Amino acid sequence: MIRTETDLQECRKLWDSLSPKQDAWDDWDLMYAFHHQDDHRLNFLVHHSGDGPPDGMVPLVFDTRENRYMLMAGSYPDGRVLWLRNEHFPEFFEHFPEPTVLFDLKQGWVSDLLAQHPQFDASFSEPDLRYFMVPAEFGFDFYNHIDTFPPEKKQKFLYDLRHINKREPVLHWSNENEADLFIELVNRNFGAESDYADANNASELRRVIDELAQSGRLKTLTIEIDGAKQAVSLSLRHGNKMVALYAASNNDYNNLGKLLNVEAIQEACRLRVDEISFMTGMQWKANWKMKSEPCVTLRKPPRELAAE
């Protein structure tokens, strides 16, 4: 049996009881920070076997702005899995309202599910790649990784870093909340086209960074040039993994963004984390020879049917 839960406190209790509590995306406080209370309506689907306790859940919310159902926290978190037994998936799928879009599910989990339920293959579309690095593989020093680049690419990469370092950048690592600096830099670079020109997106980012700062999981890097902060990286340290959530630099300074990302990786090396994730998308991550794993989006109805 599947029931729908909409009460906030009950949804949190269900989350706490069913979450595997392994990754950052399993944490209620962080995911609730991504939750838009004014625009998202809780619609958790909860599975019970007979009269037993809950044994599976899909934490859906209804996005009133986009007129669709999605996982709580929306499209930003990647590599997610659904907290359910594979044999219960057809029942859940039947209860997914239309339209439902579950973004960037972990391909390994999806493949295992489809091996048991191939009839749902058409519902999983839009592949993407999550990029990450394992510092132990290059001796906890990113410059060892640069040594694996083709000679011309390595030479250009190191030249770019030397060039920006001539500007005598000053690096500051801290746990300070620099959300406003990030928003300012992105809006400066992209103007009205910036995602953070949208007040809702800016508010979401501020909530997320505030939660990370309060929980002690925020790793902040700012880079100062010419007496002012010109770049910022806001990362999450959860367990022994690091996620490079947000990064922005003043585009007037060539290669400053490159330095920002190199230093984020070097900090992950200093912390000796198991993994630093750079999340999905963007070709430069592949160009840096990062490792990757596929993600895939579920849609009901499938995109082909929805377009008809």
Image: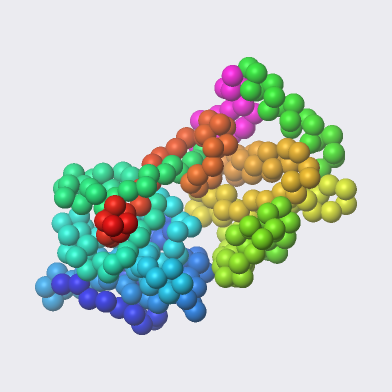
Residue 180 in the image: x percent, y percent? Answer: 70, 64
Judge from the rendering whether residue 72 lies leftward or rightward of residue 150; answer left or right.
left
**Can residue 16 be seen here?**
no
Residue 264 placement: quadrant: top right
Is 171 placed left or right of 47 in the picture? right
Residue 202 at x, y percent in the picture: 62, 66
Q: Is residue 87 left or right of residue 186?
A: left
Q: Would residue 50 be found to the left or right of residue 62 on screen?
A: left
Residue occupying the point 32% across, 65% down = 99
The colour scheme is rainbow
292 magenta-colored: no
On the rendered image, what quadrant is the C terminus found in?
Answer: bottom left
- Can residue 148 be found in the magenta stretch? yes
Q: Residue at x 22, y 62 (%)?
A: 93
Query: Would you place residue 159 above or below residue 260 in this image?
Result: above
Q: Quarter of the image containing the N terminus?
A: bottom left
Residue 55 screen position, x and y as percent: 22, 66
From this view, report whether residue 303 is shown above or below residue 43. Answer: above
Horizontal and vertical percent position of residue 29 = 48, 69
Between 158 and 14, the residue placed more toward the observer is 158
- 196 shown above or below 231: below
Residue 100 figure quarter: bottom left
Q: 226 or 218: nearer the eye?
A: 226
Q: Which residues are magenta?
A: 134-150
Q: Identify the image quadrant of residue 145.
A: top right
Q: Is residue 227 visible?
A: yes
